[in-house]
Amino acid sequence: MQNKKANRSIKPIYLDYQATTPTDPRVVKAMMPFFSESFGNPHSVDHAYGWEAEEVVDRARQQIADVIGADPREIIFTSGATESNNLAIKGLAHFLRDNPKGTPRNRIVTTTIEHKCVLESVNRLEREGFEIIRLPVDVSGLIDLDELTKAVTDETALVSIMAVNNEIGVIQHLTKIGEICKAVGAKFHTDAAQAVGKIPLDVNKMQIDLMSISGHKIYGPKGIGALYVRRRPRIRLEPLIDGGGQERGLRSGTLATPLCVGLGAAAQFANEEMFAEYDRLSALSHHFRDGLSAQLDGLQFNGDPDQRIPGNLNVTFEGVSGAEIMKSLPELALSMGSACTSADLEPSYVLKALGYNDEQALSSLRIGLGRFTKEDDVDQAIVLLVTAVRKLRSRT
Ligand SMILES: *Cc1c(COP(=O)(O)O)cnc(C)c1O
């Protein structure tokens, strides 16, 4: 860490698109007027400043809704996917606890590979008395749908399963999960921070009741996200933030107009360019994988080879530590897993959930490719990685 900070002159090749993405310059441009001349409060109903802001916020809501097959009235702006996940999970659990109806539903089903903000939200609910089932995943990172069926009963309030994992890029079988939930009347929440704009999503076809979205994972600004909340049948949540009753009472506070505009624009670009970008990134990541495999032995590519987004490679380099590789390569911006935990040298809990031991997990790196990654970047990264790994291996 310290080494890298000292090397300020080096601008590394960015290969960490699952940690965050740069805001697309087209998105920045769309946002700019709403910081200055068009500064109105979208909740001011008495004058043109407010009307203008309200209009662009509504447009952003529509742009987001269009990406997931939702109605704009079902989109609630939040500060990011962390808040969306907290609101979905705690909001639903607390509403049901405080407004009991019919059979008590005290169970929440999730997985062991969720983002920390989901895991910590259910941990808190467990301390409050909810029953939490954390489903394991197989070595490819997928949950077992038979186990899910057994876990989801008519006493299950909520199933929270991420669409795409942020460390290994694996896509869960959302449509089947939706069917399993629906069969017993459990609500289905999915953390789609890594999926929106990358793979087709449809809240109706997939029978999703709640979906979390993050701006900065889709080339939008940081500090904004959204929660999709189904209207028919209506999903009721207890808000986390009380106040002026904005966002249908679910999330009070003045909306950040420029950020809303940015998230809307980012969603629209991602949607329009999704299929072309999917193909381009597939080709690039195959090229990356083949380039490494041709020159290095003892590699393992983690996560299901087919059920995955193309912009992610998670690689185990047998016999070398990922931290050492990163330390010797200030030219590359890589990570060992989630941005939240990579500072402390803990092995990734996601890779451990796949059945890896500490040593294997600590020998793994996450390579994230995205919109601004060029073939030349990949070629350079292959050479740098091959050289560094060979050198480190020859030392031992
Ligand atoms: C980044 C991320 C989050 C957190 O999103 P923020 O908008 O940064 O709060 C949650 N879940 C997943 C899967 C993520 O990748």
Image: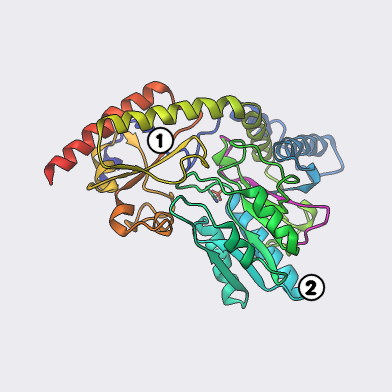
Give the CA distance from mark 1 to mark 2: 47 Å
Amino acid type at mark 2: Asn
Q: Residue at x 73, y 56 (%)?
A: 252
Q: Position of residue 151 (x, y in %)?
A: 62, 67
Q: Nearer the viewer, residue 125 or 148?
A: 148
Q: Is residue 302 above or below residue 156?
A: above
Range of the magenta residues? 219-236
Q: Is residue 48 above or below residue 353?
A: above
Q: Is residue 155 above or below residue 62?
A: below
Q: Nearer the viewer, residue 316 or 215?
A: 316
Q: Residue at x 60, y 27 (%)?
A: 275
Q: Write down the quadrant of residue 65 in the picture.
A: top right
Q: Position of residue 77 (x, y in %)?
A: 69, 48
The furthest residue to the front: 146
Q: Nearer the viewer, residue 21 or 140?
A: 140
Is residue 229 shown left or right of residue 299? right
Q: Residue at x 52, y 38 (%)?
A: 309
Q: Earlier in the sequence, mark 1 or mark 2?
A: 1
235 within the magenta span: yes
Name the residue that disc number 1 marks: 15
The furthest residue to the left: 395
Amino acid type at mark 1: Leu
Q: Residue at x 83, y 56 (%)?
A: 233
288 within the magenta span: no
Q: Secondary structure at mark 1?
A: loop
Name the residue that disc number 2 marks: 99
Q: Secondary structure at mark 2?
A: loop
Task: For residue 78, say whether it is visible.
Answer: no
In the image, the residue with mark 2 has its CB under 8 Å from the nearest atom of ligand 1: no
